[in-house]
Image: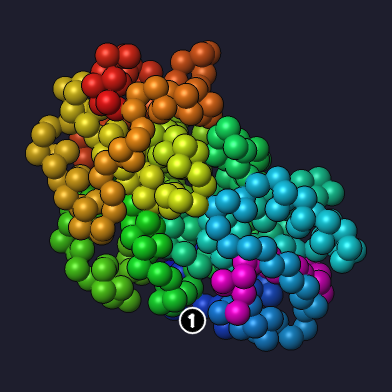
Amino acid sequence: MTTLTVKLGERSYPIFIQPSLLSQGNKLADYIKTDKAVLVTNDLVDPLYSQTIIASLPDIKIDKIVIADGEQHKNLASFEHVITQLLNMSAARDTTLIALGGGVIGDLTGFVAASFQRGMPFIQIPTTLLSQVDSSVGGKTAVNHPLGKNMIGAFYQPKAVFIDTKTLQTLPAKEFSAGMAEVIKYGIIYDKAFFEWLEQNTAQLIAQDVDALQYAIARCCEIKAEIVAIDERESGLRALLNLGHTFGHAIEAEQGYGNWLHGEAVAAGMVLAAKAGQMKGWMQTEEVQRVIALIEAFALPITPPTDMGYDTFMQHMVHDKKVQAGKLNYIIPKAIGEAIVTPELDETLLKNLLN
């Protein structure tokens, strides 16, 4: 087992990474302080893993809330549905929520936990690669609005994160590839050596080699834990984790949530960000080509939808969370392993990039 810690003082919490971790109820029980918990999951994950968790916790009464799968259900209607179910179950402030699923379930459950009776404990059990390496760690919780992704939410940390790498065996190939976009992101923004390791181990990762996966997931969580410990509420360094997301969120909103997977949109967004860095004279052409080649190697898109141009992108990006004092900040790589937050993308550059 790999164990990491997100260091946030009294709100610090562990990340456990190991195959077959879901059946180890004794460890999970350590983070449930009463004899009652509520499992929140979706209709695809529920038949795969819910019973394993319930059976591993025989001394805890576990109720279950199941919502439909898909990014289109990460909204206020689902938030209200889960809240209503908790009220019908007579859940209390000390009832633990267990988020079992991908990023949608983790973000939604975390936001419910932050809001219900002004805060209740929750545990993250991410079952997709994307949620294991990114959204389950760091306490960003939210639901989407038709005008913008993740616009309604809160910073609220879990009590623990349990990552069972065997859950990736039931993940569709397209979802696995989408998760790899977030893995690649860490190499571009923070760790050149990790980017090079990804280039060298592409075949092993595609084959889901156990050791390669364990290392990649752990390294991503390690980087994110380090960044979150420095900048929990995204006032500086943590914004780098949004590489590709400004362009990517615009793609998701325009195409309809769920039609492009989040990781697919981020992949295309990272290529746009790398090309912007090249236009600014920061990224070398060879580095941009390496970024594109690695993204392509995992069957991810490297261009945005053909029906989206400058005007369409800007229509959505004005609602981005990184707008400050009327200016949109962009996350742009200066080199592989280094990125900055900058408002310095003028209209001419953006039109050349997006049209």
Q: Which colour scheme is used?
A: rainbow
The mark total stands at 1
Q: Is there any visible trace of residue 324 in the rendered image?
A: yes
Q: In which quarter of the image is the C terminus?
A: top left
Q: Which residue lies furthest to the front in this view?
A: 307
Q: In which quarter of the image is the N terminus?
A: bottom left
From the viewer's side, name the closer residue of 236 and 81: 81
Where's residue 100, x and y in %? 60, 67
Q: Dot 1, how many residues are within 10 Å of its Cα: few (below 14), some (14-19), or many (20+)?
A: few
Q: In this view, does 296 lie above or below 316?
A: below
Name the image quarter holding residue 288.
top left
Image side of residue 174 versus residue 326, left or right: left
Q: Mark 1 = which residue?
A: 20
Q: Does the magenta stretch include residue 128?
A: no
What residue is at 77 percent from the left and 83 percent from the top?
59
Name the image quarter holding residue 292.
top left
From the viewer's side, name the closer residue of 130 and 81: 81
What residue is at 36 percent from the left and 33 percent from the top?
308
Image side of residue 29 versus residue 246, left or right: right
What residue is at 40 percent from the left and 69 percent from the top?
172
Where's residue 209, x and y in %? 28, 75
What residue is at 67 percent from the left and 56 percent from the top?
109
SS of the residue under disc 1: loop
Q: Residue furthest left?
A: 286
Where's residue 104, x and y in %? 57, 55
Q: Which amino acid does label 1 sit on?
A: Ser
Q: Is residue 127 above or below residue 323?
A: below
Where's residue 158, x and y in %? 63, 55
Q: Is there any visible trace of residue 98 in the rendered image?
A: no
Q: Give the range drawn in magenta.
A: 31-47
From the viewer's side, name the closer residue of 113 and 276: 276
